[in-house]
Image (tube, helix red, strand yellow):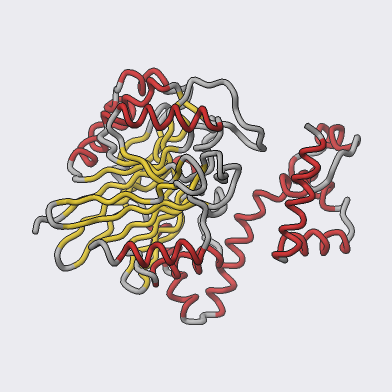
Amino acid sequence: MKDTKIMIAGDLMPMSCNYDLFAAGDIRALFGDKLCELFASADIRICNLEGCFTDSDQPIEKIGPNIKAPTNTIRAVKDLGIDYATLGNTHSMDYGRQGYLDTCRTLDENGIGYFGWGDSAATIKSYVEINDGERKIILYNTTERFENAPREDHPGVNLYDEYRVCREISALKERCDFLIVLYHGGIEGTHYNSDIMRTRFHRMADNGADVVISQHTHAIGEEEHYNGAYLLYGQGNFCFHFRTEVTPHLAEGLVLELVIGDNGFSATPHRIRRTEKGCIYDDEQELSAFYERSKIHDRLLGGDSEAREEFERQFGRDCTKWATAFFFLFRGTNPLDAEKRKELNPAEYLEYLKKSYTRDQLLGMQMFLHNEEFNEVGNRIISDLLDETK
């Protein structure tokens, strides 16, 4: 049987800086010749659509951006040859039911398959089956919870629940030759995945996943070969120009090339780099930092204490990027904060916020975050308060 070549891109969504190129279908201007040729060489092409295709101006209420693109910008996605799109992600429900319906219609009209969400909690389409000759391949999409949960009477995404997801993966593997899981989660801006994510990936692989890929982090993470499976923790962006300032982790991403044969498969990451309006193939293919980070998995599994110290240091450094937002959001209203933000530089402002909490308050916050019971209670308290303040 002939080999099957699959190209998997990370986060993709037209933005105001490139709406015109997407609407015109100018894939050469957006992606360059070499990247276009790489996608043209594949049998199956997949991406994560990080937002809605809608002309609605009614976003849902949430913290963080509501992301959409005009429906006519789908043209370049189609012309690049994308066959399937994952929609179980952070932003696919940003415009509620109307955004959901408009996105489904736009993809249907352009012959692009999609999965990872559905009309209601009972009708989620979590996977697609593909037949390439006699070889059957299944793509499965799941995501962490954001403002995207489905209800009995409202669309939403395939939320990650370990027991259910692993059970579904196990059943699906019995029906196919190759199973790819596209997982939307992790900590944004991190090059090192968490212990929780590593455990989740291992369990999905133990239940039959051949490849597990994390999107959402907007940063290149690490790879791991585990129990016959290939795990990619953090694919980085494909073409997602939401932020105008280009930090190092936003300037690069990976396109994963999978070649599936009768006697196994190969996984090859291709480094891409961001341009002013798109992304192109990086001719240098400098991936030494990626491969160096990836070595930590074998060392951690082997109980290497130095590897554990290195991981905790690097992961902790990445998490620190969220410290100011974390302390500010837990703080409540304080009239001094606005003035302090003007007076102090970012590092000084963070120290100011930290000092406003007692040790007992920090221990209490940690309890609500760590403990499942208190986590649930805290979410209910906040939900009730949000209802009161409408």
Above or below 305: residue 369:
above
Above or below 304: residue 316:
above
Residue at 29% of width from left, 22% of height from top? 26
Q: Position of residue 380 (x, y in %)?
A: 75, 51
Above or below 13: residue 355:
below
Q: Is residue 256 left or right of residue 69?
A: left
Q: Residue furthest bottom?
A: 303
Q: Position of residue 62 (x, y in %)?
A: 66, 36
Residue at 60% of width from left, 42% of height from top? 147
Residue closer to the observer: 128 or 217: 128
Q: Quadrant of residue 96?
A: top right
Q: How many marks?
A: 0
Q: Position of residue 58 (x, y in %)?
A: 59, 24
Q: Is residue 196 left or right of residue 232?
A: right
Quadrant location, the N terminus: bottom left
Q: Is residue 50 left or right of residue 379?
A: left
Q: Position of residue 218 (x, y in %)?
A: 49, 45
Residue closer to the observer: 216 or 379: 379
Quadrant location, the C terminus: top right
Q: Quadrant of residue 273?
A: top left
Residue at 35% of width from left, 44% of height from top? 9
Residue at 67% of width from left, 49% of height from top? 322
Q: Quadrant of residue 253?
A: top left
Q: Residue furthest left?
A: 1
